[in-house]
Amino acid sequence: MIKLINLSLVLFIFFNLIAFDLIAQPNMTNVYGRRVQSLNGKWDAIIDLYDQGRKNKIYLNKKPENKTDFYEYSFENGLRLNVPSDWNSQLPELKYYEGTIWYGRKFNLVKESKERLFLYFAAVSYRCRIYLNGKEIAQHEGGFTPFQVEITDVAKENDNFLAVEVNNTRRADAIPAMAFDWWNYGGITRDVFLVSTPKVFIDDYFIQLDKTKADKINANVKLSEKLAYSPVTIEIPELQLKQTLKTDAQGEVKTSFIAKEIKHWSPAAPKLYSVKISTQEDQIKEEIGFRNIWVKGEDIFLNGQPIFLKSISFHEEIPQRKGRAFSQADAVVLLSEAKALGCNMIRLAHYPQNEYIVRMAEKMGFLLWEEIPIWQGIDFENESTKEKAGKMMREMVDRDKNRCALAFWGVANETQPSEPRNAFIRHLIATCRAIDTSRLIIAAFDLVRFNKEKQTFVMDDPFTKELDVVAVNKYLGWYDSWPVSPDKAIWDVAKGQPLIISEFGGEALYGKTGEKDVVSSWSEDYQETLYKNNLEMFKHIPNLRGTSPWVLFDFRSPFRFHPTNQDGWNRKGLVSDQGYRKKAWFLMKEYYENK
Ligand code: GCB
């Protein structure tokens, strides 16, 4: 008996070690600034609704070798899918598909003996296993953050076969969980690269302006190996700053620069500096901006000046294509419309969006709020869900910590008070703080209610005190009817802290006219009234420091099944699915112009 228990214990530890080994490794910083070979393009694909592929080892990609051999699959001459892209928008029969699809492709490479090679996936939605030349080499869960795996020893010069098993089945322990108000796009939705590095390379760096000192730049650089006394040079040529330092026993250098002549980044003047980091073997370049942001009392200060956040949200979706946004060109489409509206900030809803969007937003002068998809219905009591969320947070903060546009890390959207929820969110805040203490922590709540005795809007959730900035989603005139007229709507919410209205709005089918006071008219006229009323109410929120209407574009969502007005779309967009501006867009633009 004891022997049996021991054996199962040994087996348990053994299999867990194997599984642990396969979890994708921490990501190197700034893959887009490195030497890469793109693996984007057409990939072969196999739909595997009943999950038979793994047990049949189809990743071996075998071909019959003798008269009795046969295989009931082939990656060749079948379905072909674009990478990057979701699968749902590529074939009518994949529109609602939730399950497994296998992707396969061959590639060759030039192998230098002094180099290391990594496979980098900017995002795969939602969970995946990676197989190279018949061997499983990595697993990843989470549809919106990148991962990498070293393949130096597994890759050959010619005829590598790469298979990716992708699954987007919704699960109660996943993030997001079973139901959410956007499309459950599956697939290899972002870039895939082969990254070459020297043996010892610049693995990570964090270079940003000091949180409080306007002329002090802090810089940390970490090598891929724990190599001491290795010289690392950090340069900002335009500011005539340069230092060469020796690494400590951890292979790290930490330093700071005083830059009296620095021009701070801001939405009005999004100045970026070219920064160069080099070692004897490696070199990497980046465009980095310098600004600081902090909270004092009820105000938010950017570079020492109080700021009002004129924000907007969008999903990572091109409505006209009915699919995920993934390219630089897509980023321009989405962000240009936010620019035209007069925004100085984007709330990237509800998950980390691709790096083209983040980097382009920084260049165009938008502050950013980035969040992981902790969206209603998360299993806060599940330890493994908590671990997963922490990992997502780490992957997001690590990817974007050098982007000065990043002002807010979002830790939750619409959660209800409970001890497990508090512990869960505290874990996310601690995970974030372990990497970055300079950004503001924010969460969006939907608990504001009208207190009849006080004739005031109030919110009870003591957790708000643990945040730098409090945000509220409130749909007055849509989900909630007005308990008082908008000019009498007094707010007493998160007193002593800055407050952002992170969502408000209502649905309108583009081109539909109707009675301007009837919600169910689904008309642009009613949506305009709703905006008028909310903008009036905002005058009575003393600590209001920003607004973010929901939402810039109509977006696809199976949540929305009114046959004529919605038809699988959330119609709260200020811009229609065809790219036309609705009446409320112009009202919002005027509001932002005058702010
Ligand atoms: C919300 C959610 C957002 C939804 C929106 C709506 O509160 O945060 O994801 O899409 O409401 O349209 O109901």
Image (cartoon, rainbow, N blue to C red):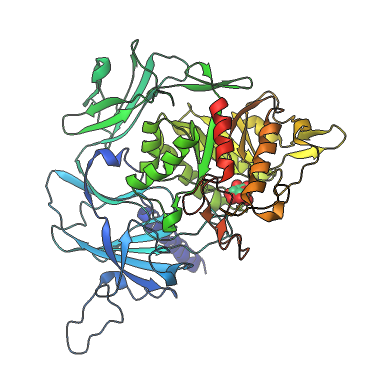
What is the count of numbered marks? 0
Please, is residue 382 above or below residue 69 in the view? above
- Considering only vertical position in the picture, is 524 above or below 366? below
Residue under the image location 16 percent in, 33 percent down? 281
Q: Residue at x 44, y 65 (%)?
A: 7
Q: Where residue 402 sits in the image (x, y, percent)?
A: 37, 31
Q: Is residue 158 visible?
A: yes
Horizontal and vertical percent position of residue 395: 42, 43
Residue farthest toward the bottom in the current orientation of the protein: 67
**Left or right, residue 221 beside residue 451:** left
* Residue at the image position 51 percent from the left and 51 percent from the top: 576
Q: Nearer the viewer, residue 459 or 561?
A: 561
Q: Quadrant of residue 265?
A: top left
Q: Is 514 left, or right, of 411 in this rendering?
A: right
- The residue furthest right is 453
Residue in front for this viewpoint, 77 or 396: 77
What is the residue that sits farthest to the top in this orientation? 260
| Side of 466 relative to 285 (left or right) | right
Q: Residue at x 76, y 35 (%)?
A: 457
Image vertical order of residue 581 relative to residue 430, above or below:
below
Q: Nearer the viewer, residue 435 or 84?
A: 84
- Report which quarter residue 497 is drawn in: top right
Can you give x and y, in whole percent of width and height, for residue 94 in the image? 43, 69
| Residue closer to the observer: 283 or 44 | 44
Could you tell me residue 440's position as x and y percent? 53, 29
Question: Which quadrant of the figure contains the C terminus?
Answer: top right
Q: Is residue 390 left or right of residue 544?
A: left
Report whether residue 402 is seen. Answer: no
